[in-house]
Amino acid sequence: MASIKDVARLAKVSVGSVSKYLNGGKLKEKTRIAIEESIKELNYEKNIYATGLRTNRTHTIALIIPTIWNPFFSELTFYIETELRNYQTKLVLCNTTNNYENEVAYISMARQNKIDGLITLSYSNVDAYISNELPVVSIDRYFSEKIPTIMSDNFAGGKLAAEKLQQAGSNKLAFIGYGSIYENSTRDRYRGFQDYCQSNTLDWEKFYYEGHHQEFREQLPLFIQEQIVNKGINGIFVVTDEQAMEVIALLHQNVKRVPEDIQVIGFDGSKQSNNTPIYLSSIRQSVPAIAAEAVQCLFNIIEKKEVPLKTILPITYQPGTTTRD
């Protein structure tokens, strides 16, 4: 494998000139061309790890997500990795499987292995492990430390969901959702929904559970039967697309047609794949924008630039087949 010295020898320039070129420094046009031709001829590859030892950078970023099986998290991972390529930085994916111990272990790994920075979607009590020692950007979750957070306009999304259900003919609404007991911006989806219903004097019910997901799933069928079916609810906003699909399955078990009897809107708007047609009506988060903002914010922190503590991105309504649009 060719070394930087081999490149310098073939180009008939100093090692310092080659190093300056590799690190983006300005050189005379003749020198630049000679170095580029030598690199191409020798098939030279820059040793980013050796460079990292000199610059205290590893050119790697860790992304912590609860699970790769959720379409929203998968799509976000794709766009974050795409954005990182613009910075010649690799992604280390940390899939916690919603496990607190796994999450703590990944955060410790990021610190010990000198990862340049961390982007995290955390719904666990890991505040004690998050500090300013490691550049960190959070998505959706607020931490006690002054950690920048990137989020969608969840409050506006909740209001928009209620508005779209009403416009499509639903007049008795319900909000359904499971969430973390730790403060996060997704709670604003419920607050926005509540605000719209109260401002427009709509009848509505809610089932918002904070605790173990399994307990939510065990109690949800009873709520669907007693509070949705028996009370004549005809429009439901569910806090995520994933949970919305669970709700639709239970409605079918109770012989309720969607959207003929009950309309359903989720939140995320992620597709299973590029070729999958849209099924669920949803409040769409701009995943590419979230990824771009998170990566840009993280590199601004790494470069000691000022960053806002809160960045709120707009949402849109994505019609599907679960509403009568």
Image: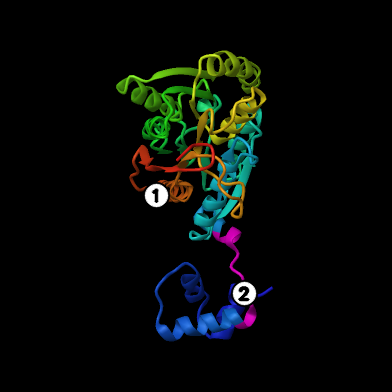
Q: Nearer the viewer, residue 141 or 117?
A: 141
Q: Given the image, on which type of amino acid does mark 1 rest?
A: Asn
Quadrant of res 261: top right
Which residue is found at the position 52% from the left and 23% from the top?
176
Residue 125 left/right relative to 188: right
> How far, Cα to Cα, is label 2 from label 1?
30 Å
The answer to whether one can see residue 321 in this image is yes
Residue 94 pos. (x, y %): 63, 41
The answer to whether one can see residue 211 in this image is no
Select label 2 or label 1 by which is in front.
Answer: 1
Q: Residue furthest right?
A: 1
Which residue is found at the position 62% from the left and 23% from the top?
213
Residue 19 pos. (x, y %): 50, 71
Q: Given the image, on which type of amino acid does mark 2 rest?
A: Tyr
Q: Magenta span has 47?
A: yes
- Disc 1: which residue: 300
User: What crowding class fits label 1: few (fewer than 14 Cα within 10 Å), some (14-19), or many (20 or more)?
Assistant: some
Residue 50 left/right relative to 31: right
Q: Magenta span has 276?
A: no
Task: Please give the range of residues in magenta.
Answer: 41-51
**Location of residue 294 with respect to 160 vertically, above or below:** below
- Disc 2: which residue: 44
**Location of residue 86 with respect to 250 vertically, above or below:** below
Which secondary structure lies at badge 2? loop
